Image (tube, rainbow, N blue to C red):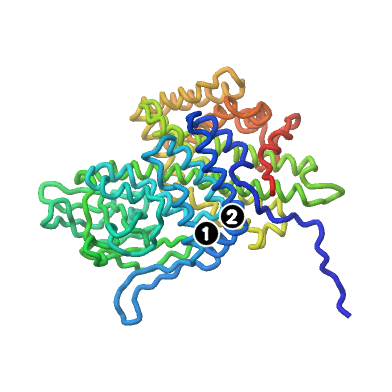
Amino acid sequence: MTAVTHTVVNQAPPLVGHDVYSTDTALTEAVARHADPALLAEVTGELVRLGEAAGSAQAQRWGEEANTYPPVLRTHDRYGNRIDEVDFHPSWHRLLGHAITAGLTDAWSRPDGHLRRAAGFLVWSQVEAGHGCPVSMTHAAVPALRADPALAAEWEPRLGSRSYDPRLVAPGEKPGALFGMGMTEKQGGSDVRANTTRAVPLAEPGTYALTGHKWFCSAPMSDGFLVLAQAASPGGGGLTCFLVPRVLPDGTRNVFAIQRLKDKLGNRSNASAEVEFRDTWARRVGEEGRGVATIIGMVAATRLDCALGSAALMRQAVAQAVHHATYREAFGGPLIGKPLMRNVLADMALESEAATAAVMRLAAAYDADTEQERHLRRLGVAVTKFWVTKRCPVVAAEALECLGGNGYVEESGMPRIFRESPLNSVWEGSGNVQALDVLRVLGREPLAVEAFLTEVGRARGADHRLDAAVKDLLSELGDLEGVEARARRVVERMALVLQGSLLVRYAPPAVADAFCASRLGGEWGSTFGTLPSGLDLGPVLERAAPVAG
């Protein structure tokens, strides 16, 4: 006789079959706030369809499979010919194809393009984060390519295409294209001016032969790459931006030797490679010696995507934790009814909502594109990238703990979120790089500082704790003597007052009050779940709750 010992009770059902967009109150409100009212119905319809797909069992299975079966490098074919190809699981292609079809690389040429694209990126990244890398770089390549109008005219329609074609064929034979980037080298890391890859001019004007090694080249299956190299031109030269196609116009493969794929902590569905150039054909983008200035537009866009990606991870982590606590019972009732658990969940929810408010505000600044908004982006992106990406790992860890042992096993999906969580603080400039960039702006770009303070000042008088924090920040900014050693403190304060100002202006009073009391008013501990007593946490949790279908 078989004993029945495994009756399953008191387990939360899977969070599946729901609309990831519509159940994210902070995100839907941000879209409604920043969108052109005449376009809101159209934008909402797009995002609802994407949200329903993101919450489906099928999409969740794609995400699991893309990470269970990571990419495989094939350097040679069966006959010994060098091919340098990367094989991906079909689910990777499904994820990437859905992202492209949804317009997540199409922001630069349509009304409210950046707002709708940022919201979509935040929604779809919750399914699986790794494929967001080529999506991000393809989107971000556009401003760099515009340094050369001829190149932009050739490539921009392909990058904004809604058609995904993974074949390695001549770009002119494909309806759409993906882009990657290669800046980092072994000896330099973030110090890209130390790059040693050399670019020798060829007979055809604007073309070069590149020789060197890139230590990190993400998405090596892409159709083209923006790379930095030292141009070796008589009477000129210097660090310059180049476009390196994988396949040349005549259909032959460019020299693009993939030496190995990186074995990474997370982001395992995505291929990051070491790449060697040996007389690799390239086209110059922008002027010689102006490589950093040319590619900085791409870097800024990818930095915002890092913050968006971290906001997506936080949102999904918090949604899973709130969902679990809603159904799981302990000590005589649902976990979400226990005062201490409510404090933990609400604390994380504040972090997630503040991140969403900040990244969507900056995305909207791309659409407005006035001088004021450009200056705000210059400082706001670096500040937000620094802070939001650093908050992601602690949110992910706390949310995992809310599920207890269930959260530590792979089937819950929480370990994948946790492994992914440190990535965005490393990519596109680590925390110190972002902090130093902020210091550079503070010292050299007064209009950017003015734009940032103007944005924060729009909430003046609405909350005394925010006003006091802004006053303290102004004191910090007024004393830049020896500021490098305290740069992180300065940038953290800037991020918090920006988030606080947005929540005070736009979020319900209970949310703004809890954020200002904890993050700005000093009534907060060193871990989540240390919100002060007397706050109204009900509305905070209601806004964070995902609704299963």
**Res. 450 in view:** yes
Q: Residue furthest top?
A: 461
Label 1: how many Cα within 10 Å (few below 14, some 14–19, many 20+):
some
Q: Are marks 2 and 1 in contact (CB under 8 Å)?
A: yes
Q: Amino acid at mark 2?
A: Phe
Q: Secondary structure at mark 2?
A: helix
Identify the residue at image location x=89%, y=80%.
Answer: 1
Q: In the drawing, does residue 180 fall left or right of residue 417? A: left
Q: Which mark is residue 418?
A: 2
* Residue farthest along the bottom direction in this orientation: 79
Q: Position of residue 463 (x, y in %)?
A: 61, 21
Question: In front: 357, or 155?
Answer: 155
Packing grade of label 2 (10 A; few <14, some 14-19, many >=20) is: many
Q: Residue at x 77, y 50 (%)?
A: 327
Question: Element under label 1?
Answer: loop
Residue 485 seen in this snapshot: no
Q: Position of residue 229 (x, y in %)?
A: 25, 53
Q: CA distance from mark 2 to mark 1?
A: 8 Å
Q: Is 42 or 315 nearer to us in this picture?
A: 42
Up/down of 211 relative to 332, above or below = below
Please state the horizontal and vertical placement of residue 313, each as a whole percent of the image: 57, 49
Q: Quadrant of residue 57?
A: bottom right
- The vertical placement of 275 against 476, above or below, is below
Q: Which mark is residue 525?
A: none
Q: Mark 2 or mark 1, which has the lower sequence index?
A: 1
Q: Amino acid at mark 1?
A: Gly
- Which residue lies under the disc numbered 1? 266
Q: Residue furthest right?
A: 1
